[in-house]
Amino acid sequence: AHISVADPFSPELSRVVAEAVATAGGTVHEGGTFITIEGPRFSTKGESHTFRQWGMSLIGMTTSPEAYLAAEAEIAYACMAHVTDYDVWHESEAPVTVEMVVRTLLANTAVAQAAISHMAATMASWAGEFPAHSGLRDALITDRARIQLEKRQQVALLVQKYLQ
């Protein structure tokens, strides 16, 4: 099966996350493009300038593997990115240091915790079926009649509803 990750974040869940962060007092920027780099590390100036020229809004070390796995498991996925620095492209800012990142990260943690608490407290009002929850429906191309019982059992957790 191949599943589209053209739009890796669930618009429905992303709206819920944005509202929760705003309610928690955080600054929200919706949309944009996230590039995932191998980490843990900071970008070089060359990478940072290249990513900006490509139109990237955020640089980070997570979201790619998680977004793909969530899509394949039919889990709605959203990103609550808490920016810690400008990266090294911003010449008027001091170069990124671990101390700067940790200081900002600690401040962001309070907003993230409050947003997650808000989402949990209001889950009954927004949780439900999102399009992401049926992402595999059209992705399975193997003739169902030709899938052996052993293989069916191996993938049942994720695709049983499509193997009926």
Image (spheres, rainbow, N blue to C red):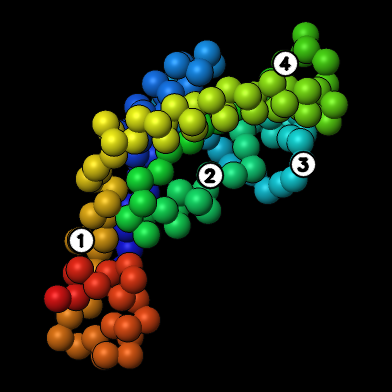
Q: Estimate the spatial distance between the alpha carbons at disc 2 and disc 3, rounded to whole Å.
A: 16 Å
Q: Is residue 55 left or right of residue 89?
A: left
Q: Residues within 10 Å of mark 2 (few under 14, many from 20)?
A: many
Cβ atoms under marks 3 and 4 closer than 8 Å: no
Q: Residue type at mark 2: give it.
A: Thr
Q: CA distance from mark 2 to mark 4?
A: 24 Å
**Mark 2, secondary structure of its residue:** loop
Q: Nearer the viewer, mark 3 or mark 4?
A: 3
Residue 88 - label? none
Q: Of marks 2 and 4, which one's residue comes earlier in the chain?
A: 2
Instruction: State which tag comes first along the sequence, 3 or 4.
Output: 3
The answer to whether mark 4 and mark 1 are in CB contact below 8 A is no
- The residue carrying mark 4 is 90
The label number, if any, that marks residue 137 in the structure image:
1
Q: Which residue is identified by label 2?
A: 63
Helix, strand or loop at disc 1? loop
Residue 41, labelled with which disc?
3
Image: 68 above or below 126: below
Task: Place residue 137 in its image quadrant.
Answer: bottom left
N-terminal label among 1 and 2? 2
| Image position, residue 163 (x, y; %) | 19, 75
**Which mark sits nearer the N-terminus, 3 or 1?**
3
Nearer to the camera, 79 or 3: 79
